[in-house]
């Protein structure tokens, strides 16, 4: 078929086999595809002509420099101004100054949202429409910190999930560190949060076939060993689903579930050697959720440092709960380390009896009055520090429980001797005054 015999683009070519069926001039039931313009042999349409640049006077172009710096010109005016700036030096310098001034008017703002935006939006929404099933106050920090970490994980790329992260913590003997990846940190949070889930009756993320001691370190190692391949970003979905399930469960359970014990493993009793000489470590659910929020914030900071991403601290009211938990756990932790021989005992302070303190105060008042009447000593000594009732009670409890009877007798003799000395000095001072 030559070029002159080819059909027009708008014409349809009927099938030869169906020509006999459509001799009456009717169109076939299924139309054939149209021929392209290139196959028809016709010339392609000419492209649309390029827009002609505006020809403006110098004073008009100079007056457009401010609008051009603010990106408020049309496309034709912007092209005309840019072509003029390549030929006119004074206008180019003025355009540069205007562009710098625009940068000062509009300072660069961070693309990251305000950390407190989510809290403010939720408080505003809940203030207008209270939730039917509210989240307990002690679970709100965990909900907020997991949401912030999830937003951070959503912004990082696939390659950053394998960025190296150095985890640091303090063991019994000293500081310990472990190198892992961003995905490994999320796996650690998934395994340890599963201990809270087990206390609430949820499924174990390690699976029913994995039997390990209920200890955070052992559970993390077991999860890493059970994975045939290094953790990837696929671990984000089960971790996020578990956090949502924890918040949903404690919300439906109500505030009374905060007293539910959460086991954190066992530690050997000082002096015990057998497996039965183990002491269980438990926290109530309200403290355990705050502890999980604290660890989520710490590890989120580790991930942010690994991927070079800014990360703000928690909200003040959430941070207050974390500090309160640490302050309540610190005395018991120090006492346990002292009993195990891993920490030195606190320094002892001299305890003053009430009678000795009164006698010494009287003696020093007499010395002060003598110094005021012309004695060689011109400075009045300060009275002894008054021991608080709580300190005296603690000293009596400690002496009665931890100190031997012989040491108690020695201390009482020393106190009695100091009392007698103070009385004698007070008697001498009173005789001198007479």
Image (cartoon, helix red, strand yellow):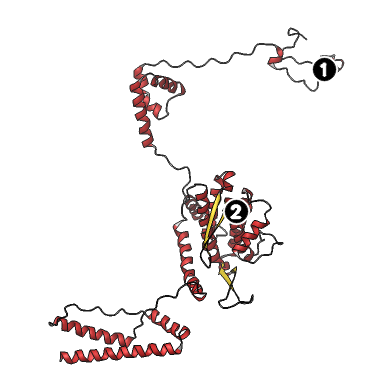
At numbered mark 2, what does the secondary structure look like: helix, strand or loop? helix
Q: Where the C terminus falls, by quadrant?
A: bottom left
Within the image, what quadrant is residue 276 found in? bottom right
Q: Where the N terminus falls, by quadrant?
A: top right
Within the image, what quadrant is residue 79 found in? top left
**Height in image: 407 above or below 104?**
below
**Height in image: 236 above or below 286?**
above
Query: Counting other residues with Cα less than 10 Å from the Cα at mark 2, is it few (<14), some (14-19), or many (20 or more)?
Result: many
Measured from the top left, where is residue 370 in percent x and y?
Answer: 16, 84
Q: Is residue 140 visible?
A: no
Task: Residue under label 1, please give it.
Answer: 15
Q: Is 128 displayed left or right of 421 in the figure?
A: right
Q: Is 77 displayed left or right of 1 in the figure?
A: left
Foreground of the two, 415 or 289: 415
Task: Residue under label 2, please give it.
Answer: 184
Measured from the top left, where is residue 253 in percent x and y?
Answer: 60, 64
Q: Is residue 285 visible?
A: yes
- The numbered mark, 1 or 2, whose residue comes first in the sequence reads 1
Which of labels 1 and 2 is toward the front?
2
Query: Which residue is depicted at the point 49% across and 74% down?
Result: 338
């Amino acid at each position: 078929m030559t070029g002159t015999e080819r059909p027009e683009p708008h014409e349809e070519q009927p099938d030869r086999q169906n020509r006999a069926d459509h001799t009456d001039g009717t169109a076939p039931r299924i139309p054939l595809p149209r021929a392209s313009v290139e196959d028809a042999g016709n010339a392609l349409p000419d492209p649309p002509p390029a827009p002609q640049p505006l020809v403006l006077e110098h004073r008009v172009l100079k007056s457009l420099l401010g609008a051009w710096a603010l990106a408020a010109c049309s496309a034709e005016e912007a092209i005309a101004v840019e072509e003029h700036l390549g030929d006119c030096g004074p206008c180019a310098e003025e355009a540069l100054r205007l562009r710098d001034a625009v940068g000062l008017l509009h300072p660069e703002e961070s693309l990251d949202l305000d950390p407190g935006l989510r809290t403010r939006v939720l408080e505003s929404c809940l203030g207008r429409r209270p939730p039917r099933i509210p989240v307990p106050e002690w679970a709100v920090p965990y909900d907020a910190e997991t949401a912030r970490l999830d937003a951070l994980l959503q912004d990082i790329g696939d390659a950053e999930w394998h960025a190296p992260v150095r985890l640091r913590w303090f063991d019994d003997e000293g500081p310990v560190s472990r190198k892992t990846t961003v995905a490994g940190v999320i796996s650690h949070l998934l395994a340890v949060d599963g201990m809270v889930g087990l206390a609430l009756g949820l499924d174990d993320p390690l699976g029913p076939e994995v039997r390990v001691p209920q200890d955070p370190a052992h559970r993390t190692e077991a999860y890493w060993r059970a994975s045939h391949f290094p953790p990837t970003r696929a671990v984000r979905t089960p971790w996020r689903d578990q956090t949502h399930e924890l918040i949903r469960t404690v919300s439906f359970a109500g505030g009374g579930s905060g007293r539910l014990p959460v086991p954190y493993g066992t530690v050997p009793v000082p002096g015990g050697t057998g497996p039965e000489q183990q002491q269980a470590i438990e926290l109530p659910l309200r403290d355990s959720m705050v502890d999980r929020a604290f660890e989520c914030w710490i590890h989120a900071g580790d991930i942010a440092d690994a991927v070079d991403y800014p990360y703000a601290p928690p909200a003040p009211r959430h941070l207050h709960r974390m500090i309160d938990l640490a302050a309540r756990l610190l005395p018991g932790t120090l006492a346990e380390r002292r009993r195990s021989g891993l920490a030195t005992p606190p320094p002892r302070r001299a305890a003053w009896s009430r009678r000795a303190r009164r006698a010494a105060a009287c003696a020093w008042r007499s010395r002060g009055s003598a110094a005021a009447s012309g004695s060689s000593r011109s400075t009045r000594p300060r009275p002894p520090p008054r021991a608080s009732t709580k300190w005296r009670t603690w000293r009596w409890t400690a002496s009665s429980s931890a100190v031997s009877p012989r040491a108690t007798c020695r201390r009482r003799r020393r106190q009695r001797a100091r009392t007698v000395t103070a009385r004698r000095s007070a008697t001498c001072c009173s005789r001198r005054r007479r």
